[in-house]
Image (spheres, helix red, strand yellow):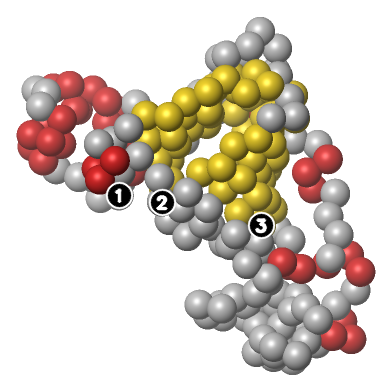
Amino acid sequence: MATDPDPLQDFCVADLNGVPSVNGYPCKPPSSAGDEFLFSSRATKGGDPMSNLNGSNVTELDVTHWPGVNTLGVSMNRVDFIPGGTNPPHIHPRATEVGLVTRGELLVGIIGSLQSGNRYYSKVLKAGETFVIPRGLMHFQFNVGKEEASMVVSFNSQNPGIVFLPLTMFGSSPPIPTPVLAKALRVDAEVVDLIKSKFTGGY
């Protein structure tokens, strides 16, 4: 039977059949939490970046894929890119992100809040170089090299969440009314409808 997280336990392996709370999933009994929950080989091989139109693929290592991180406030992703591939503009509402480029060359872009004047920060990073993205700021990565690229990122949350800006605006369900987007973006309704048509199948 699963139990609630105990601050005196060394770790709390997630019982993914339980109902999660703000602090994470209920704990598996320590007797059933074997070594495999604390180790993972999931990120040794990335996914196929050709599988979507963005030209990138995210291999997630959050609590649902790595139950050992439950209640620890950490998680990871591996992201692979084809040349010209992008991890589209997005935010993580519950986590700061730290990243390490492991292969290729990636343009990393970060956009500040209105308070900063929506300042755009960017740099092309090569293998071995790192970046940090404060929680809630919009950011993206784009492979500017001629070869495939990869990065590994870590979050200070077991479930950082993600909001893809293009998909959120143009592929929500139900959709945001076209007049709202046309007014906000200062374009004709036909332009909004055209962009919406590109996101009918999601990402």
Residue 33 position (above or below residue 117): below
Residue 114 in the figure: left or right of residue 134: left
Mark seen at residue 75: 3
Amino acid on which disc 3 is placed: Ser
The amino acid at mark 2 is: Gly
Place of residue 170 in the rendered image (x, y in percent of width and height, measured from the top left): 28, 36
Horizontal side, residue 165 vs residue 61: left or right: left
Residue 65 point in image, percent of width and height: 70, 58
Name which quarter of the figure residue 24 lies in: bottom right
Residue 3 vs 35, above or below: the answer is below
Q: Secondary structure at mark 1?
A: loop
Task: Estimate how packed mark 3 is, as few (under 14), some (14 to 19) or many (20 or more) residues with alpha carbons within 10 Å.
Answer: many
Instruction: Give the Cα separation between the discs numbered 3 and 1.
Output: 28 Å
Residue behind mark 1: 173
In this rendering, the answer to whether 75 lies above or below 147 is below
Q: Earlier along the polypeptide chain: callout 3 or callout 1?
A: 3
Q: Is residue 14 left or right of residue 201?
A: right
Point 25% across, 50% down: residue: 174
Name the quarter where the N terminus is drawn. bottom right
SS at badge 3: strand
Give the mark nearer the N terminus: 2 vs 3.
3
What amino acid is labelled 1 in the image? Ser
